[in-house]
Image (cartoon, coloured by chain):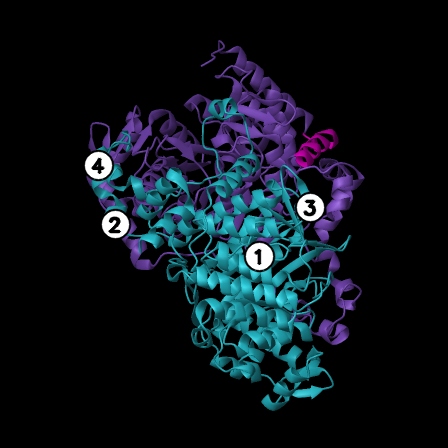
Chain colours: A cyan, B purple
Amino acid sequence: MATQETAQRARHGGREARRRERTQKAAGLGRPYILRNIPTYDILSEENLERIERAADRILAETGIAFRDDPVALDLWREAGATVEGELVKFEPGMLREILRSAPAEFTQHARNPENSVRIGGRNVVFAPAYGSPFVMDLDRGRRFGTLQDFQNFVKLAQSSPWLHHSGGTICEPTDVPVNKRHLDMVYAHLRYSDRCFMGSVTAEERSEDSIEMARLVFGHDFVDENCVILGNINVNSPLVWDGTMTKSLRAYASANQAAVVVPFILGGAMGPVTNAGAIAQSLAETMAGCALTQLVRKGAPVIFGNFLSSTQLKTGSPTFGTPEPAIGSMVVGQLCRRLNLPMRCSGNFTTSKLPDAQAMTEGMMSMLAAIHCGTNFILHSAGWLDGALSMSYEKFMLDADVCGALHTYLDGITIDDNQLALDAFAEVGPGNHFFGSAHTLANYQTAYWESETADNAPFEQWELAGGDDAATRANRLWKQRLREYEAPPLDPGMDEALKDFVARRKASMADAWY
Amino acid sequence: MATQETAQRARHGGREARRRERTQKAAGLGRPYILRNIPTYDILSEENLERIERAADRILAETGIAFRDDPVALDLWREAGATVEGELVKFEPGMLREILRSAPAEFTQHARNPENSVRIGGRNVVFAPAYGSPFVMDLDRGRRFGTLQDFQNFVKLAQSSPWLHHSGGTICEPTDVPVNKRHLDMVYAHLRYSDRCFMGSVTAEERSEDSIEMARLVFGHDFVDENCVILGNINVNSPLVWDGTMTKSLRAYASANQAAVVVPFILGGAMGPVTNAGAIAQSLAETMAGCALTQLVRKGAPVIFGNFLSSTQLKTGSPTFGTPEPAIGSMVVGQLCRRLNLPMRCSGNFTTSKLPDAQAMTEGMMSMLAAIHCGTNFILHSAGWLDGALSMSYEKFMLDADVCGALHTYLDGITIDDNQLALDAFAEVGPGNHFFGSAHTLANYQTAYWESETADNAPFEQWELAGGDDAATRANRLWKQRLREYEAPPLDPGMDEALKDFVARRKASMADAWY
């Protein structure tokens, strides 16, 4: 018990952190995840949702989806009654919906610290860091290839943030480790430097299995068989292709009763049509097929319905992120997902900006607020994403995590009761007077307003005297401070040894592969 | 006719602008205002809305609102049946609602170029620049007091923007002109350098009357008596005080059948309670009283229900802007305003940042999207606001106007028809192929995606070679280019003479006053 308390204090580091933690507790913040208290933003009528569903059904029945290099997946589809023509699979309307009825609407992903377990689905919202960048970037050193050190840093920064709920997965590629061994170091870092939930590797079937096996060393084999402790982010090769690497990893997670996050990757104009309705229909078709496959592997296995819409700048072919069309599209995908009664994943702070600047946050907010409004349960890419996912930014990580903080308060919505309505305060203060010292203010100020860690609200002169820094510069100081203050959460030494031993044995069994 | 075409071309300036205009026309953009095609985001139940309405009714009946230094207003309230105790006015529940039934739900504000007239109310959305800053700011010269030259520049930039619909009012204070004469130069600038709708002065009764009189010189006395051609932004002196300067200006606008924009100014913790529900109830009470007064002055006069909620950083007392509580609050005020069947004003890109940086756009987007979602019809402060309204920023103006562009597409929502659903495209392209060259893409690419003027979507290497600029630096180049390319819209020389003559006569009639 003493150890856990020490660990909790240590996690947020130092006196300042303890003060912050007290304030957060008082404000009802610093929670393992958010239970949303505002409705979803539903923009499309039932009739139009049904038209999209029928379009998806036609894509599935007439065009079909290719499942490449995975005969087992084809067998599963054949047994389930789909039409298999070579690697092309076609589905009767309604078939996938029927299969998906066995998937849970909501489930718990367990963290090794039970206080950090998260509930995925329903009205719950979980923020996880960005995923998959080959580069990292900070204001001091600019852009460079990511290393294991960077990866560990981001695990530590996520663990230290009061506003992120999840350690994520491949936060950045540790490019200084051989490709076939990275997953071992990444999963170890999540388990050692964080006590929050995390995601495993998916880049090869055996790497998925290694990831799950490492989770078993911590959680126990039987527990893992009955509970979700690890997620795997499984991408469609849009348009309408599932490749074998992905479906084999999907099967590895599902057969271990772990949750696959099934995500298309649709940049309109390239991997999908340039029209929003068509891209959404495609997304629905691709995601339903992937989610249904998990149920054929293991009925009742948890699965998350993913959404990833974006657009392209058509005159150059460059991807664009954080634009209005995918934001609107996400709202519709949210409605469609709820009609399937599945937990949903969406992407957070998207941008193509190369710097943590005005563009980055404009696009990021457009994208993140759509994820919030559409009712997403698991928001990947909540913090750090820059340059179209090519860079993980230290500064943007802090700025985005701060946005996640604001969104805690936002999702709390509004409470209507006598204290909140403050009628006594008006009687006390009266016309023309200030509320600063009123009894109502004194009784409520501690929980009154969310406070940003990166914004500067000081008067101009005071800000100027203090150096006149921009938000990115303040974020630069903040991530360094957090890393300095970081202390690892406790991990049972026996478990740690077992993990290290597993990593060493697996590494010794393979020659280095660099591509 | 030829003149008008020339003027339209000139307004957007140059070959690049013409190309842009063609693209916008093709995309159905570049409109005088937006007709929203997505629903409002309603977050509160009928029951809770009624609780807030009852709280507002209690504030009005029990605490009351002070109307200072305006005996005429007190007489109007007395005649309408309110209880007047000295300067304090108390209202029976339901009384203001009853008076407000004569106010139009929707009206047209006419521009001197009829193509630029805007419809305010209903599902219409109008973007206007920020209002009221004493300072201006740009990357080259930093912060400094605003001048008439700056004011004219911003009128020109608003006129040149394809995404703003309105010329606004006191975009920045022209501090090089005496306080008592500024309004003449500002109204002249709106009428000379823009052919869009605009707002007049409100800082004194005679300045309001001068503003309206100048509008009459352009639109004609009879037309103005029957149509709205000018708005006046009238602020409550929150909490619960209407001062005489404001109510006299409100009466001047209403009696001329011009629209008062009635806006509280509630920074929670200072001019209102720290709890959101209470601040909203107060806002409702204050705004209903101001709007109702317009109807006592002239039944049926157009009036706009304003919303201005923000918060304070309680440990320092500094105002904060773009925080989550007012964003949520705005959504609720939107619902309450629709129950009154009045057109609504909200604020756009709020921030306390001192630079056009990540903080500025994070807070700006939080605030602007709330204005969009809550169903606002007239969004003041859509572009340029910096430093808690103390500075008008040239660069942020361009960045914000770009956001307004994105919001055109956002508010268009999604169309569901056979072409948008793209079923033929899936049949044509099939699994695993690209949509770039497909018939569906070729048929739709011109109207496919909104394109930002300030975002950089290029690959990192290309962006770096081109200088590695941030968004603010690109915006700096853009506003200078726009001012270089600007050409004034045509104005009848006789009208221009009449306006100049009026300004000269009014200036000659007054000694300079500098405070």
| Front residue (pair A427, B240) | A427
Give neighbour class at mark 2: few <14, some 14-19, many 20+ (Cα, 10 Å).
some
Residue occupied by mark 1: A327
Disc 1 marks which amino acid?
Ala
Element at badge 1? helix
Q: Name the residue under label 4.
A: A439
Task: Tell me the mark number nearer the camera, choosing from 4 and 2.
Answer: 4
Give the farthest residue toward the top.
B511
State the residue position of label 2: B54
Q: Which chain carries label 2?
A: B
The disc at residue A144 is 3
Q: Quick one: SS at disc 4? A: helix
Which range of residues does the magenta coloring cover?
A: B473-491
If you read the primary sequence from the N terminus, does the residue marked by circle 1 or circle 4 appear first?
1
Nearer to the camera, B128 or A250: A250
Q: Are marks 1 and 4 in contact (CB under 8 Å)?
A: no
Q: Identify which residue is drawn at 60% across, 42% down.
A: A356
Spatial CA span between label 2 and label 1: 36 Å
The chain under label 1 reads A
The reply to whether residue B128 is in sight is: no
Marks 4 & 3 on one chain: yes
- Earlier in the chain: of badge 1 and badge 3, it is 3
Q: Please determine whether, in this image, residue B504 is positioned above or below residue B225.
A: above
Q: Respond whether the residues carrying marks 1 and 3 are from the same subunit.
A: yes
> Circle 3 — which element?
strand
Badge 2 vs badge 1, beta-carbon distance below 8 Å: no
CA distance separating discs 1 and 3: 30 Å
Q: How far apart are marks 2 and 3 (CA)?
A: 59 Å
To the question of a shared chain for discs 2 and 3, the answer is no
Label 1 or label 4, whichever lies nearer to me, is 4
Main secondary structure along the magenta-highlighted residues:
helix
Q: Which of marks 2 and 1 is in front?
A: 1
